[in-house]
Image: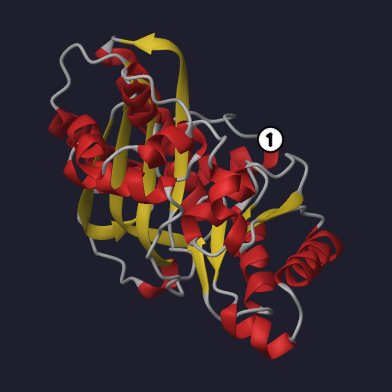
Amino acid sequence: MHVRVPIGLPEPTYREVLEVLSEVSPVVQAVPPGAAVVELRGALRYFGVPPLRLAETIRVRSLARLSVDLRIGLAPTWAVAATASALAPEHGGIVLVEPDQVSDFLAPLPVEAVHGIGPMQARALNTYGIHTVAALAAMPLGTVQRLLGGRAGRVAAERARGVDPRPVTPKALPMSAAVRHRFAQQELDGAAVRARLLDLVVELASTLRRREQIARGLTLQLDFAAGTRWSKTLRLSEPSAHDEDLRTAAYRLMDAAGLQRGRLTGLLLRADDLVGAHAAAEQITFDRGREMRLRVESVADRANARYGKGTVGPASLLRKAA
């Protein structure tokens, strides 16, 4: 069973959805930020009901407890179930694909509708006149691999035939927090990009402090106009949720990207490997300037919490005023 939650669902509510799923099956794999996969074989034997009945039960529980409607796909494999859930109604619903219906279900779909076939791969296939899953499934494996590459071609050919050997591995939602910015148009100005990155740093750091967490790592993801993506993770020297520390790490990541005239469409900044703020020792420092900036930071948090987000700007700007 592949489950999709509404776009933009808050992380705490997403975690509650995962708990609802775990009541039916102990084998639940979180696929953040908005999906999960559930192995139902044991649950079907235990409850003695058909898959559709289990899915209906989960959907009703999620609606009753959390006011969250789910899009659910049921199928013999992960990829087919994910394809089915994507075709469920936007407001919530269930799509069931029986084992003997997999070929008929996939055949008329456009290749980009299959889970695991990305937009760039779909465009490459379309260029050679391959628009439907039926056409892709009929192609020899070697031909698909020449068009898409070795591993990508094999995966695409398998998914078109409904084959997906991946098991569902129990996995809780990773302890992370992320913020994103989408540019209204393709951005070439490095100064403008760094300004938006600083905004993300302040927002992310404020979120961590509000949740009383600190990050051990930071990940920067850059989305480009061509549909490509660059991502890199940096381990922090000391776990932190302070603007200054996260800003330094974020700028190091941006420098590592080596941008020159890259046309950016979006930024994502993620704090990784989070732990409770109480779990980290506070480093003694003799840097009076830093101590003053951290005090200003706590005052800014209280002001923003009381009067609204953005009332007080980034700590780096306040440092100049101090």
Q: Position of residue 176 (x, y in %)?
A: 43, 57
Looking at the image, which residue is at 68% across and 45% down? 6
User: Colour scheme in the image?
Assistant: secondary structure
Residue sitting at 31 percent across and 72 percent down?
A: 281
307 vs 310, left or right, is right
| Residue 317 vs residue 142, the one in the foreground | 142
Tell me which amino acid carries mark 1.
Answer: Tyr
SS at badge 1: helix
Residue 15: quarter of image: bottom right
Q: Position of residue 311 (x, y in %)?
A: 59, 29
Q: Is residue 283 visible?
A: yes
Q: Taking 60 as reference, is 163 left or right?
A: left
Locate residue 283: give its quadrant: bottom left
Judged from this view, the residue extending furthest toward the right is: 64
Residue at the spot x=38%, y=11% of the render?
Answer: 186
Q: Which residue is mark 1?
A: 307
Tell me the residue at 60%/46% (across/down): 105
The N terminus - image quarter: bottom right
Residue 275 vertical placement versus 235 (above, below): below
